[in-house]
Amino acid sequence: MARNQYLTIPRVIGHRGAAGRAPENSLAGFRRAAALGCRWVEFDVRLSSDGHPIVFHDKTLERMTGQTGEVSAMPLSALLKCKVAGAPIPTLEGALAELGALGLGANVEMKAEAGDEAALAASVAAAIARGPPLPLLVSSFSLPALAALFRVAPELPRGVLTERLMTNWRDAPQRVGAAALVCNHQTLHRSAVRAVQAADFLLATYTVNDPDRARELFAWGVDSVISDVPDAIMAQRSG
Ligand code: G3P
Ligand code: MG
């Protein structure tokens, strides 16, 4: 799959909206990211126990809502009663509608639990199909989820998330027809960036909050950085 054949991603993507500037994975955070000048935001999607995709990072509710329990064990009706910074947890459908209204693109990260990969991919594909037309990339650490997405919606651009690029890094994107790799910047080296470029994959990195590090990554040829403080990264780029 050729680099940039059908996918372009912006140089700076807001992480979980703009998590350093507003509550993570919230509609308010998406609005803040747009106000800061972001073109895209990354956010996390999990399945409720009754199969509805919601925008939430953690496996459990505690950190963000103060409630107890696992997201995957609770139905949508109960999750919608949980508040993040005073607002209900967004549904994927609501998030996509908000992004459409804001004119933002989306890096939708699928947070799969063992056994729910196919259902998660199907629900994400269905929500995207029903939602406004947006530029987007669907990423995941879960190869089964990405493979399931490839089966049900091969037209959706996919990105393989990884903590580290191993020597066999090509295998995963080839298996799931992904055009992009999204790697933890802390494990990334210049030689790996060159190899990914030479193989015609897009390369994004997370989570880059230091403008100097972002400058270095761009100099190496990284296509995109995902940042909690996208305004700080964009400011150094134009400075
Ligand atoms: O998608 C990049 C990044 O969000 C992956 O890590 O834990 O912040 O979802 P995490
Ligand atoms: Mg994420």
Image (spheres, rainbow, N blue to C red):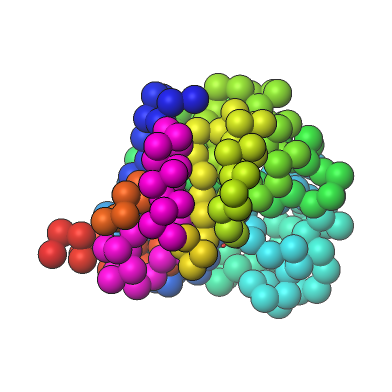
Q: Nearer the viewer, residue 68 or 228?
A: 228
- Which of the 4 image quarters holds residue 177? top right
Q: Quadrant of the C terminus?
A: bottom left
Query: Extreme left residue here?
Result: 239
Relative side of 166 to 98, left or right = right
Q: Is residue 1 above or below residue 44?
A: above
Camera sees residue 144: yes
Which residues fall within the magenta stretch? Answer: 189-217
> Where's residue 161, x and y in %?
58, 50
- Quadrant field for ligand 1: bottom right
Between 200 and 63, the one lying in front of the other is 200
Residue 108, image x, y percentages = 55, 45
At 74% from the left and 63% from the top, the residue drawn is 59
Q: Is residue 182 above or below residue 57?
A: above
Does residue 187 sit above or below 156 in this rendering? below
Q: Quadrant of residue 237?
A: bottom left
Magenta stretch encompasses residue 160: no
Whether residue 216 is in magenta: the answer is yes
Residue found at x 44% / y 44%:
195
Query: Residue 77 in the image: x percent, y percent?
Result: 78, 52
